[in-house]
Image (cartoon, helix red, strand yellow):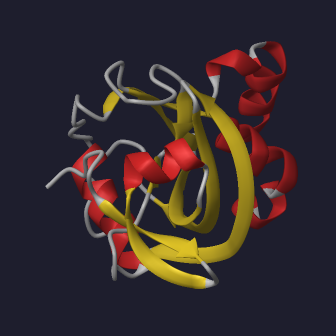
Amino acid sequence: MISNDDTLIPVWRDGALVPFRKLEAHRLGLRHKAVSVFLLSSRGVLLQQRASGKYHTPDLWANACCTHPHWDEAPEACAHRRLAEELGIEDVGLEWREQVEYRADVGGGLTEHEVVDIFVGHVDDTAPLALNKDEVQATRWVSREGLAEEIAAAPQLFTPWLKIYLADHERAIFG
């Protein structure tokens, strides 16, 4: 099942985690849990271009998978679920790297204020992907250096969180 705007996600309210509607959390800029996955191979890092129909940051390039855990869903289980739902990738080993917090305006009066568990997996870059076109319109492999050059040349083509991760957490992601 693909998450939608009414999905209940973990949000901090009055110092405690509570279930809250995802879209409303973004409208209010509430601090909430999130998960990001980076997939690496001999060709570099896998990027996904977000689908045109996404309610924020459509058409922008992001890391392999970025999402919100459902209420009471463990971060690693969420990462595996969304890799399967978005890219058709199953049975990849994921390594937790770190937890980061950021706040970013994502347009349309929406704010991501996320506490993100970052996971990294190593995959065969020739394995076929099964893109969910409601979520992802394209994917591509890019070298770490090439990605840095692309972001410097055209930052408007990339999601705010990808730029933050690479500027502030590159060592944790790429080791």
Horizontal side of residue 4 vs 142, given as left or right = left
Residue 40, percent from left and from top: 56, 53
In the figure, residue 115 lies in which quadrant?
bottom right
Residue nearer the viewer, 23 or 98: 23
- For image coordinates 25% across by 56% down, the residue present is 84
The answer to whether any part of residue 88 appears in the image is: no
Name the quarter where the C terminus is drawn. Answer: bottom right
Query: Picture coordinates of residue 10 (x, y %)?
Result: 44, 72
**Would you place residue 116 above or below residue 77 in this image?**
above
Q: Residue furthest left?
A: 1
Quick check: can you spot residue 116?
yes
Q: Decide if residue 31 is on the left or right side of residue 8.
A: right
Instruction: Please name the residue shown 44% across and 78% down the image.
Output: 18
| Residue 169 position in % (x across, y down) | 80, 58
Front residue of this view, candidates 10 and 143? 10
Q: Residue at the location (36% across, 18% down)?
A: 52
Where's residue 68, x and y in %?
Answer: 43, 60
Q: Residue lying farthest front? A: 14
Between 72 and 83, the one nearer to me in the picture: 72
The quarter of the picture where residue 49 lies is top left
Viewer-nearest residue: 2 or 137: 2
Q: Quadrant of the N terminus?
A: bottom left
Measured along the vertical axis of the image, is residue 131 above or below residue 158?
below
Seen in the picture, residue 45 relative to 13 is either above or below; the reply is above
The total of numbered circles placed on residues is 0
